[in-house]
Amino acid sequence: MNVRLLKAPDRPEEAITVAAKICYSDKTFEEIERQVTRESAYKFVRMLKSLGHDSALEHVSFTFGIEGISRAATHQLVRHRLASYSQQSQRYVSMEHADFVMPESIAGSEQARQLFSSCLEMIRKTYSELNNLNIPKEDARYILPNACMSNMVVTMNARELLHFFQLRCCTRAQWEIRDLAQKMLDLVQQAAPVVFENAGPECVRTSCPEGKMSCGQAKQMRIRYHTHSAQNE
């Protein structure tokens, strides 16, 4: 899977600070912007997050390009409704030479790998034969498996991304979408270090919500996802 950050806001912490301060100020945007420095914005955003005043985080959004993700994972991803998605269409794009995602649990077993590969080869052959019979791609796709790779563009605002990371960086999340979430988190922490400071599964900031289903690794997860504070410079 390849994940790229296609678009990120300039000075996101400063944009969030201006958006929040306008609620309680009679000053113009220009006046507020002149008063906001990088250092003061970092401090202000940390304060907002500590108080749970997250609505201002919705004013900055991030756009990702995702390649080589399975349909099994994209079906999970699009359940996050406060986001925008553009996905490669199997109605219009031929899947005759499509690639497939093979889980490590299958790849690690020679017998399972052979079964998986032979099944996919049969699907490829059948899809090609359906095309030769002039079956529309939108109908031929009915035989394609969840393993079929797809490409997509995803845009989320910062507040929704934090929620996404809380759910999908958790050890109980499915392995592929957890891998995606980690790649996305690594990218946005570079673009907006304070906004995504200490972001990760919910147990990083509070207690584990999984109850009896907990992995029991909350302490290790807090150490793993703790990030050094961004430099105020």
Image: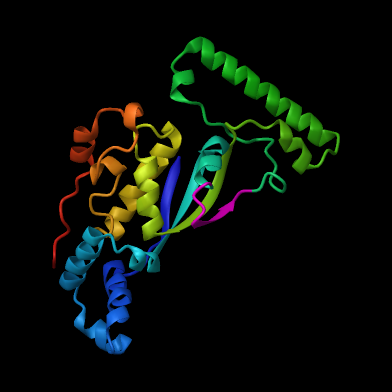
Residue interval drawn in magenta:
79-88
> Could you tell me which residue is drawn at 51 percent across and 41 percent down?
76
Is residue 227 or residue 183 the one in the foreground? Answer: 227
Left or right of residue 77: residue 58: left
Residue at horizontal 21%, vertical 59%? 50
| Residue 4 falls inside the magenta stretch | no
Give the percent coordinates (x, y) of residue 151: 55, 46
Residue beneath the point at 31% across and 81% down: 22
The relative height of residue 25 versus residue 108 in the rendered view (above or below) is below
Above-or-below relation of 108 to 219: above
Residue 220 in view in this figure: yes
Q: Position of residue 205 (x, y in %)?
A: 23, 46
On the picture, is 173 further left or further right than 221? right
Instruction: Verify whether residue 86 appears in magenta.
Output: yes
- Residue 58 drawn above or below residue 217: below
When asked about the image quadrant of residue 24, the answer is bottom left
Q: Residue at x 59, y 20 (%)?
A: 117
Can I make out residue 194 in this image?
no
Q: Residue furthest right?
A: 133
Q: Position of residue 3 (x, y in %)?
A: 43, 47
| Residue situated in front as seen by the camera: 82 or 92 | 82
Q: Residue furthest top?
A: 111
Scheme by which the image is coloured: rainbow
